[in-house]
Image (cartoon, rainbow, N blue to C red):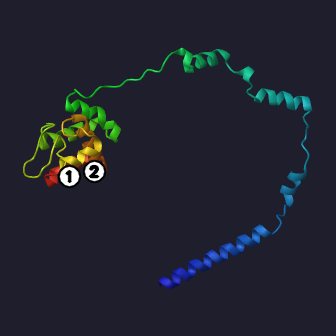
Amino acid sequence: MRTVAIASGVAVAATGLAVSTGVLSQPMQIDGAAAALSTATPAKSMSQAELAQREQRASRSVDDRRPVADRSKARVLSNASGAAVTRTADLSNADPKSIAKALMPQFGMSVSQFGCLDNIWSQESGWNVHAANPTSSAYGIPQALPGSKMSSAGPNWESNAETQIRWGLGYIRDRYGSACAAWSYKQGAGWY
């Protein structure tokens, strides 16, 4: 049965190739109404002046555009209008939960998933930067196992909440895709 299906498929492909090659290699013939249309002359020819006038109406030359809008747009976009405003936040002294909320979008997670993240890390470490599990050597807010894994996020991983949270959010994103997926897994397995 499988051999018949494969052979049928090959035959159909070969037939299609042969037909398309034959059609494409033959000159195309036009007959009847199509031939009459292709050779007919227009009822009324436009003069060169009429064509030029029509083209001018259809064209959008620089003169037709709104110069006032262009000037105001140029002013807004130019460097002369002022420096760009950027905002940075120093997260080093912030509450770890605030840090997590601020960083979640950088890891592709909506802040609406913070409740799931809060559930995980409240159970794991109570959001304590120095939380250490004596039986497993898990450490920090995300309870990395071993804690030294967090060194990939920064050299200050032992005492810096932002570094630990960055590592933890990356771990959750890479392993589960979202904080709520990680929370769902943790609820069933007891760990994440």
Q: Where is residue 85 in the image (x, y as percent from the top left)?
A: 43, 20
Q: Position of residue 107 (x, y in %)?
A: 33, 41
Q: Where is residue 140 in the image (x, y as percent from the top left)?
A: 16, 41
Q: How crowded is mark 1: few (under 14 residues within 10 Å), some or many (20 or more)?
A: some
State the residue at coordinates (9%, 47%). 133
> Which residue bears the numbered disc 1?
185
Please, what secondary structure does the residue beneath circle 2 have? Answer: helix
Residue 99, quarter of the rendered image: top left
The residues tagged by marks 1 and 2 sit, at their Cα atoms, a distance apart of 8 Å
Dots 1 and 2: beta carbons under 8 Å?
yes
72 above or below 130?
above
Q: On the rendered structure, is 139 left or right of 51? A: left
State the residue at coordinates (41%, 23%). 86
Extreme residue in the left direction: 134
Q: Which of 45 and 82 is in front in this view?
A: 82
129 above or below 5?
above
Q: On the rendered structure, is 88 left or right of 35? A: left
Q: Nearer the viewer, residue 187 or 157?
A: 157
Please, what secondary structure does the residue beneath circle 1 have? Answer: helix
How many labels, in total?
Answer: 2
Extreme residue in the front direction: 155
Q: On the rendered structure, is 40 left or right of 106? A: right
Asked if one can make out residue 178 in the rendered structure from this viewpoint, the answer is no
> Which residue bears the numbered disc 2?
176
Asked if one can make out residue 52 in the rendered structure from this viewpoint, the answer is yes
Under mark 2, the amino acid is Tyr
State the residue at coordinates (62%, 75%). 13
Query: Tag 2 or tag 1, which sits nearer the N-term?
Result: 2
Under mark 1, the amino acid is Tyr
State the residue at coordinates (86%, 30%). 52
Q: On the rendered structure, is 31 left or right of 190? A: right
